[in-house]
Image (spheres, rainbow, N blue to C red):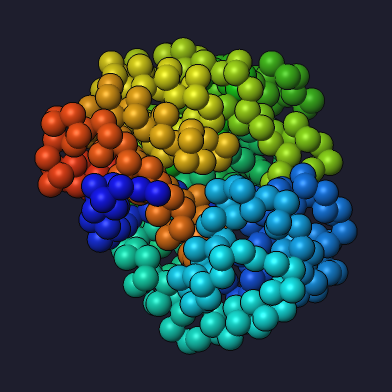
Amino acid sequence: MADQLSQNLFAALCEIPLIDPHSHIEPLSPVSKTLDDILGYHYYTELAHSAGMSQAPLKPDVSPRDRVRAIIAHMERFDNTAQYAWFMEIVRVFLGKNIRRLDEVDADALFDLGEKTFAQPDWEKQVFAKTKLEAIFLTNEFDDPLEGFDTTKYVPCLRTDTLVFKLHESATKERLAKVTGIQAGDAKTVRAAVRKLFERFTAKNAKACAISLPPNFSPVAVSDAELDAALMAKAPTDAEQVATSQAVFWMLAEHCREFKLPFDLMIGVNRRVYETGVFQGQDLFDQRTSLLQYRALFNAFLDVKFPVSVLCGISNQELVSHSWIFPNVITSGHWWYSNIPAQIRTDLTGRLQAVPKTKQIGYYSDAYKLEFVLPKFNMYRRVLANVLADEFVRPGQLTETEAVALGKRLLRDNTREVFNV
């Protein structure tokens, strides 16, 4: 149980309005309709499957109610996890049910309560208010429609994985041509198409470009002649595909510089490790990744801000060191497998003790539905309160008021400044 100082700090941190700088929210359907939208989050399907549930309940022809029953029936096997705590906080805060332990007999009643609660016409507004959420960043494919929503509340972000790693595919070229009006067949036309995308996104209040990157990727400059040859190959070799990816990535960094957008880098994810895993439950990290692979990028674009997310503690120490000396490298959030309290505490303490406080994006939710923003940020705020208490207030380095101000900088101020919100 947290002591009084930590409780006071946590309470003060919870009063700070949030700007969430990374999510997977669908702006036209941002809140849940049933508990299936909550428990369909990959964390729960992964954990239930890992703990013995077959994938049969996850098939699309299974009813939402039956899928929720199956996942809740397996929850007692992972009620020790942080993800279980998120769900219980959602049940308590948003559904008004203070259940100490969830049992499968609760599934139907909870499902009915969720349907009734989420059907309220002002539910989205209620979630924003209870969360004290001002704005949340989206993850937009380059050809996503950017109409029909308030872009000051749901902030577009150009996600570029497909452009960088699949431009050699005809389907990607067709999509790019459709949205830009440009047939991207050589370096000149690719550059023109990328410019069109940046113009389109910034006109809609986009505040960032983003990408997730595999462990073996090393961004370097590639000549136009090399890119021309790679794009014109009828059956591009692995080397030519790598050259295309490197060239497009470098163009994106150039346009981030020109359009003054930060370039979010989410580094080190190894796709499809568990090949028959549940949807989004196949990817892991490994320790071959080094941020030294990005030294050419960081040196060449000192005027571009790079908020960097990493997946493991070893990479976190490297990120801390890079952010310590590179003015353009910013520590960003606690991603995926690092997003549990024990790992957050270690990583956060290292960042706070070594990195300038103005160069840290404390947290992002990575949420698929708005109901997740509050419990995930609360998990981070509890850890932050404990670290501020133990490492800064008790040793006398900061007063309680100064510690709250430091927390506010991590939770809100740096996001506003880095992303120009």
Which residue is rendered at x = 50% and y = 19% of the image? 314
Judge by depth and name the residue closer to the eye, 23 or 115: 115
Which residue is rendered at x = 34% and y = 29% of the image? 349
Among the 4 quarters of the image, the one containing residue 311: top right
**Above or below, 95 relative to 331:** below
Among the 4 quarters of the image, the one containing residue 117: bottom right
**Above or below, 104 relative to 234:** below
| Residue 180 appears in the figure | no
**Above or below, 99 relative to 277:** below
Percent coordinates x, y for residue 94 in the rendering: 48, 73
Percent coordinates x, y for residue 124 in the rendering: 45, 75
Percent coordinates x, y for residue 116 in the rendering: 58, 86
Which residue is rendered at x = 58% and y = 52% of the image? 83
Q: Is residue 173 left or right of residue 364?
A: right
Q: How many marks?
A: 0
Which residue is rendered at x = 68% and y = 19% of the image? 240
Q: In this view, does 353 lie to the left or right of 364?
A: left
| Residue 235 appears in the figure | yes
**Above or below, 277 relative to 349:** below
Q: Is residue 30 left or right of residue 75?
A: left
